Image: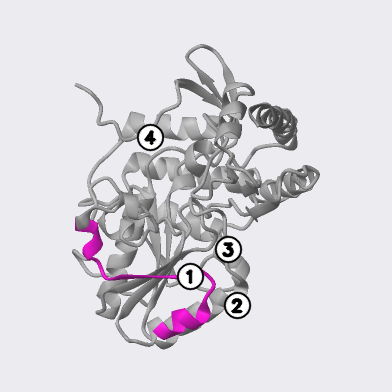
Amino acid sequence: MELFDVYPLYDITPVKGDGCYVFDKAGNKYLDLYGGHAVISVGHSHPKYVEAIQAQVAKLGFYSNSIKNPLQQELADKLEEVAGVKDYRLFLCSSGAEANENALKVASFQTGKDRVIYFENAFHGRTSGVVAITDNEAIKAPFNKGHKATKLAFNNTEALKTEIEKGDVAAVIFEVIQGVGGLDEANAEFYKTAAELCKENNVILIADEVQSGYGRTGEFFAFQKHEIRPDIISIAKGMGNGFPIGGILIDNKIQPKYGMLGTTFGGNHLACAAGISVLDIIKDENLMDNVTEVSEFVKAEASKIQQIKKIKGRGLMIGLEFDFEIAALRKELLFEHKIFTGAASNKKLLRILPPLNIKKEHFETFFNALQKALKNQNKNTVVSG
């Protein structure tokens, strides 16, 4: 049976991971500066992570949410402590898209309304509701386009105010720092105004922290810099360091009721063990401090490279913007220098999303390779010109 071919694939087959590196079946060693779309938060095959999963699966890997699972409460308590957020409840699911779907559903239940406001260059997932609020028409089937969704320019408070005051908006959802969209972040005033407008008009404010959460910016959540309190926070990616797990934090003012949400795999024993170990490692190894320290080094080194026109993002959610499309540069970094990096909808942006325990010396390797690749790219441009 053939696989349903929807992914353009590099001819690389990873078979092993160790810290900030992956190894392919031919034995080649790659520096991983992308973490599989920001998923690898505490490094490949971290021994404490591996030990936690092995110990749990040897006891019980799964049972349904029809029974008590104390690991869910342990995960919730540790998340509250490490994230520094209070007065939320946790609902666990299996992915970022599922988290955002549930966030929208809760918002609609709570407000009795059905329209959602989202923003240009947003990416919230590929399932039915969240792809409708993703700014990419190419991935929306006709079935997805029936949702009541309104796209606005990011950072435009006047347009947001006009739409919210129409009275039919259930939720405003945003990535505090856009991921696939190109690492853009609105100003603090926009976020604060959005929070105020939502509070005044019975609208649920949803912060999509699927990519920017879990310490990636140097703070646990990206929204914390802007001193706002979202009604719902969606999480996934770095939450399980590769094990499928997601969730939403729901403000205590929103009351649960039986049947309101549900999931088969969400919050299973093995997923919780993975999630708990990630939080323990982030705390015990002071990874958020490491993010801040390494990020400053990266910005300083990137500023020395004249071809880099703009440095975007925060912490280890980094975008390096050039004045040319970077597809060929990424391929050269991957195949000639054995370094994984990422792309974005902005075709001139190189995206960097490494494990949070990466060190400065790893980035020294990257910048040396980048300088060589840029010289080679320039040489090829001159020859072809």
Indicate left or right for 336 with 63 as reference: right
Q: How far apart are marks 1 and 3 (CA)?
A: 12 Å
Residue 16 seen anywhere in this rendered image of the structure: yes
Q: Residues within 10 Å of mark 3 (few under 14, many from 20)?
A: many
Quadrant occupied by the C terminus: top right
Q: Residue at x 38, y 87 (%)?
A: 165
Q: Residues within 10 Å of mark 4 (few under 14, many from 20)?
A: some
Q: Nearer the viewer, mark 4 or mark 2?
A: 2
Q: Earlier in the sequence, mark 4 or mark 3?
A: 4
Q: Name the residue under label 4.
A: 56
Secondary structure type for disc 1: loop
Does the segment drawn in magenta span residue 145? yes
Quadrant occupied by the N terminus: top left
The percent position of residue 358, horizontal first and vertical second, equals: 65, 37
Does the segment drawn in magenta span residue 195? no
Q: Earlier in the sequence, mark 4 or mark 2?
A: 4
Residue 314 seen anywhere in this rendered image of the structure: no
The percent position of residue 339, horizontal first and vertical second, equals: 60, 28
Q: How far apart are marks 4 and 2 (CA)?
A: 45 Å
Secondary structure type for disc 2: helix
Q: On residue 185, which mark appears?
A: 3
Q: Name the residue under label 1.
A: 153
Q: Mark 2 points at which residue?
A: 189
Q: Earlier in the sequence, mark 4 or mark 1?
A: 4
Q: How far apart are marks 4 and 3 (CA)?
A: 39 Å
Secondary structure type for disc 4: helix
Q: Nearer the viewer, mark 4 or mark 1?
A: 1
Q: Which residue is drawn at 34% across and 55% down?
A: 137
Q: Nearer the viewer, mark 2 or mark 1?
A: 1
